[in-house]
Image: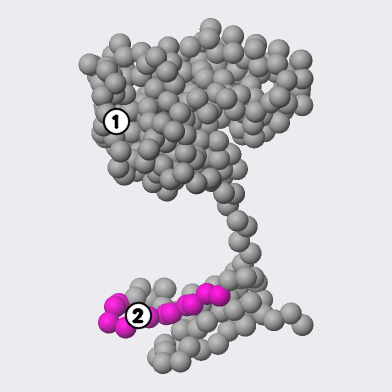
Amino acid sequence: MDIGFSSTTELAAAIARRRISAVEALDAHLAQIDRHNEALNAVVLLDREGALQRAREADAALARSAALGPLHGVPFTLKDAHETAGMKTTVGFPPFADNVPKQDSPVVARLKRAGGVLVGKTNVATMLGDWQSDNPLFGRTGNPWDPSRTAGGSSGGAAAAVAAGMTPFEVGTDMQSSIRLPGAFCGVYGLKPTEHRVSLAGAFPDPGGIPRSVRLMSCVGPIARNLEDLALICRIIAGPDGGDTDLAPVPVDAIPTLELKSLRIAFAGTFRSFPVAAEIGAPRSRDWLLGWLPPARTSRKPNCRSSTCMMISPRAAS
């Protein structure tokens, strides 16, 4: 088992089954940080001793058969935007260089309650305001595929850390592609959830108890190396928590399974008064779609002048 590049779900299962310990999982990720962080500058705040103590506590809880959360013993880092009790939250902004929150944000608290072991914080653009991750406090984050290139921003440190095996997952923030762009640049998955499904409370430092400065457009979402981990982390952090009054007081339901055979798909090779690229409108695009879908019944739609205009429906059972 390659612990450093195992998924979040694989690590959680291995720890729960005692194939590896939480301390072993932590040590593997700390080794990746020690090996690669000097070149990448992805992890900028590290609580090595605190993480080790929490990993030992996770192993002790497992030994006494305590109830386990879905992230029990799994180490993780967080974008340096989330409020973390006793650990600096700076957003790369010099006036916040010594800002140490007194409490965890709701998202951080949920990850910890799920059993996660917080290891450190990852680099960002100054005040989360750029498409690369560089700031006066910690400097620039490099791309793990080529450190001379950018990892993107503002969650560049988060995406680089996930790609380099320093952490199995991350939680970024995204207003204008701050999760999605670094994910694309670093070759990992990133999700910007629907607005107001994940709490923004404590997702940006507001020292002195002033009203939250970020309320609209920005979303909190996971970064990981596979879709299963994105779904897991999103289930953990999403939903009302009492800290963010903008969240709808409704539960987060499981994503329903979509069967292709249940779909009816309209396909139009042209749009009246609008030009369509030849490779889209050509019959071969229609043929490709038919080959990709399960066996289906097709029919021409009335008043459609294109030879590629049709309705595709599931084929009736014989």
- Say above or below: 27 vs 250: above
Q: Is residue 45 magenta?
A: no
Work out whether mark 1 precedes mark 2 in sequence or the reverse, and give the earlier one: 1
Residue 149 visible at all:
no
Q: CA distance from mark 1 to mark 2?
A: 46 Å
Q: Nearer the viewer, mark 1 or mark 2?
A: 1
Q: Is residue 269 magenta?
A: yes
How far across and how far down the image is residue 106, in percent?
A: 45, 28
Q: Is residue 310 left or right of residue 216?
A: right
Image quarter in which the C terminus is found: bottom right
Residue found at x 62% / y 14%: 55
Residue found at x 33% / y 33%: 154
Residue found at x 71% / y 24%: 67
Which residue is the site of mark 1? Answer: 212
- Say above or below: 124 vs 184: above
Image quarter in which the N terminus is found: top right
How many numbered marks appear? 2
**Start-end of magenta stretch:** 264-275
- The type of residue carrying mark 1 is Arg
Q: Is residue 297 left or right of residue 218?
A: right
- Nearest the eye: 152 or 47: 47
Which residue is the site of mark 2? Answer: 271
Residue 263 visible at all:
yes
Name the image quarter holding residue 100.
Answer: top left
